[in-house]
Image: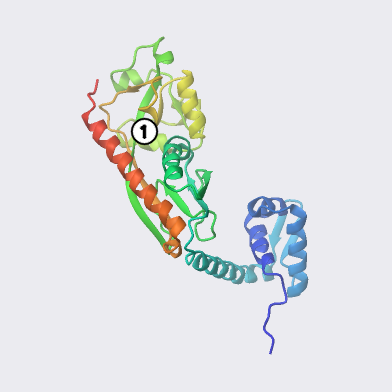
Amino acid sequence: MDYRPHFDWSSINLFVAVADTGSLSGAARASHVSQPTVGRAVVALENDLGVPLFTRHARGFELTTQGQELLEHARVMQQAAASLSLAASGKKDDLNGVVRITASQIVSTYILPPLLVQLRRLEPRIQIELVATDQVENLLFREADIAVRMVRPTQQDLIARHVGDMYMGMYASFDYLADRSAPKTIEEFASHSVVGYDRSSLIIDGANTVGFNVDRDFFAYRCDDQIVHWQMVLAGLGIGFTAQPVAEEDERVKRILPKIEMPKLPLWLTSHSALKTNSRVRFVYDFLAQSLSDKFLHLKSSNARKPTD
């Protein structure tokens, strides 16, 4: 008896994408294909399965009862296909090719580029794709081979290594301090112009941990994009917050209230366990593990020796 599926396997991924995003356009962006391609795939899958998967309405696509029942089966198939791809990739023993790394905007902009120069000198056959995003990429579905993140991964089948801690600090540009003296107490700090985040509560939560209770309205300028936030500080809009490895190498800023211990963020290097036998990914993973560990150990030591105001 022939048990071959009577549908295109690629349509499963597009079906899940439409279910997750609620629209053809959203699924097209997530899947990196055209919107008509997604639409044709959904119609073809419905015809092949003989059941309606979505109800179309003005706000987008909503799963039918049959669609909801089939979605979980589709996710299992999608995960099985991803695991098969990872298992195959793990058998490759060739340094020629691409390794895709994902990291936060701050790490991608200020930490990784100098390290990638060293990597290029060591092994020029490896090509690097760097995805700078504060969204957590899915390693299982090969959205990235390696992730550098501030949180320990909880996803199964991942290998992870703690490579250091990212210490935070408060900084102001010398242009800003030309008009106002640097604050020497928390009370003086409260009277200054402060650059914060908009919707993110990261700075507010960090301030609360050191006993300085503020809310969103405390910040004179707000932006959730950490690169833009730092540029606002450099431009002289006010005192802002960033990782010490970023600020300590910039001569345009001065650290504010250095005796106040700011929260630290752990830095984790993560990859899928199926890739541990892939020589190309393993080479990059080991290089980053050693380089990041050395960098943050050096920063911790130099910070401990640095005199405070």
- Kindly tell me whether residue 220 is visible in this rendering: no
Q: Is residue 187 above or below residue 269?
A: above
Q: Quadrant of the C terminus?
A: top left
Name the residue rendered at 64%, 71% in the picture: 70
Name the residue rendered at 62%, 69% in the picture: 74
Q: Is residue 135 above or below residue 198?
A: below
Report the amino acid beneath label 1: Pro
x%, y% of residue 260?
27, 29
Q: Quadrant of the N terminus?
A: bottom right
Under tag 1, what secondary structure?
Answer: helix
x%, y% of residue 71?
62, 67
Out of 142 and 261, give the one closest to the viewer: 142
x%, y% of residue 284?
43, 51
Mark 1 lies on residue: 245
Q: Residues within 10 Å of mark 1 (few under 14, many from 20)?
A: many
x%, y% of residue 94?
49, 60
Q: Does residue 21 appear left or right of residue 111 in this picture?
A: right
Q: Is residue 175 above or below residue 170?
A: above
Name the residue rendered at 39%, 24% in the picture: 250
Quarter assignment of residue 118: top left
Q: How many labels were placed on the picture?
A: 1
Return the residue found at the far bottom: 1
Out of 221 and 30, give the one closest to the viewer: 30
How are the residues colored? rainbow
- Kindly tell me whether residue 308 is visible in this rendering: yes
Q: Does residue 25 appear left or right of residue 276 in this picture?
A: right
Out of 209 and 165, give the one closest to the viewer: 165
